[in-house]
């Protein structure tokens, strides 16, 4: 695990955009796993600003998750978020945009279809992740056991609260379920970059880097992955010793 620290979220976002650009220059048909939430907003802004400099046309994008039961055009849907923040502003081929369909009639079949689509693309080359204050990645919430593959997740109140902004500030308006990549889907990525900013993430980051591997902190499973970079601002890194490099 490589730990990278940045003075602030803008410096972090710039470094992450540079890394994605380099990966795309090296592999124009890169399979890129993408997150939503507040943390990646600065990163997506950076990608929009540099769009002319980044070869988007061949990239294949797979999002981590999507809410169940709302239309993809609903302002709270992650599909709408991705269009707003990134896809509407870059030259990605719409056929290469993959986000679970939270309104599929058969949600279990949709989970299987999504997992198969990732496999058919050859697996994820670079997976970018945020982390929940509860240590979730995607919507793999703390539990006694975790799902391996794309599945229907019941969201913790904490996770619904942190998405309230997308639903008029009312956490109870946030759907109770989402379709999420599973732990094996995420850990199957060839490289992973986890991004965390702000003091609220410091405990989860500490557990991810220093704690035991436990399903009560799903991000801790990244410790078994051979190619993980954790990018942190000063506040998110505050519980790590200054010289922690893994
Ligand atoms: P956040 O969400 O960026 O809105 O804090 C991160 C996550 O839940 O993965």
Image (cartoon, rainbow, N blue to C red):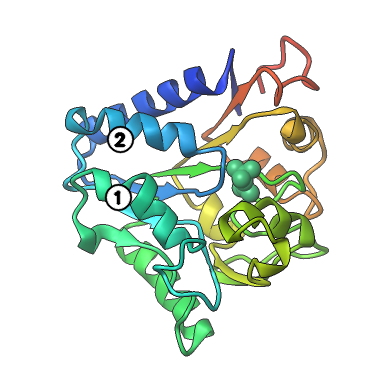
- For numbered disc 1, what is the local secondary structure? helix
Q: Relative to residue 232, is residue 70 depicted above or below? A: below
The residue that disc 1 covers is 87
Residue in the image at 76% along x and 34% along y: 200
Q: Point out the quarter of the image occupied by ligand 1.
A: top right
Quadrant of the image containing the C terminus:
top right
Q: Position of residue 43 (x, y in %)?
A: 43, 33
Q: Position of residue 153 (x, y in %)?
A: 65, 70
Residue in the image at 68% along x and 28% along y: 198
Residue in the image at 78% along x and 14% along y: 241
Q: How many marks?
A: 2
Q: Relative to residue 135, is residue 120 depicted above or below? A: below
Q: Relative to residue 120, is residue 93 depicted above or below? A: above
Residue toward you, 76 or 15 = 76
The residue that disc 2 covers is 48
Residue in the image at 54% along x and 78% along y: 69
Q: Position of residue 143 (x, y in %)?
A: 80, 62
């Amino acid at each position: 695990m490589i730990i990278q620290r940045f003075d602030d979220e803008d410096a972090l976002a710039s470094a992450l955009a540079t890394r994605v650009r380099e990966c795309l220059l090296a592999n124009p048909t890169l399979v890129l796993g993408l997150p939503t939430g507040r943390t990646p907003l600065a990163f997506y802004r950076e990608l929009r600003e540099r769009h002319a400099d980044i070869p988007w046309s061949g990239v294949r994008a797979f999002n981590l998750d999507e809410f169940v039961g709302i239309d993809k055009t609903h302002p709270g849907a992650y599909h709408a978020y991705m269009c707003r923040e990134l896809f509407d502003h870059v030259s990605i081929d719409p056929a290469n945009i993959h986000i679970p369909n939270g309104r599929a009639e058969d949600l279990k079949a949709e989970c299987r279809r999504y997992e198969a689509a990732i496999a058919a693309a050859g697996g994820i080359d670079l997976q970018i992740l945020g982390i929940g204050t509860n240590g979730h990645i995607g919507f793999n919430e703390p539990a006694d056991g975790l799902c391996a593959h794309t599945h229907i997740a019941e969201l913790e109140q904490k996770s619904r609260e942190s998405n309230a902004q997308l639903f008029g500030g009312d956490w109870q308006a946030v759907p109770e379920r989402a379709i999420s990549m599973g732990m094996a889907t995420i850990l199957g990525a060839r490289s992973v970059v986890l991004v965390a900013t702000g003091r609220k993430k410091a405990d989860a980051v500490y557990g991810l880097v220093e704690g035991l591997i436990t399903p009560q902190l799903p991000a801790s499973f990244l410790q078994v992955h051979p190619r993980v970079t954790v990018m942190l601002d000063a506040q998110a890194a505050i519980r790590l010793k200054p010289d922690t490099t893994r």
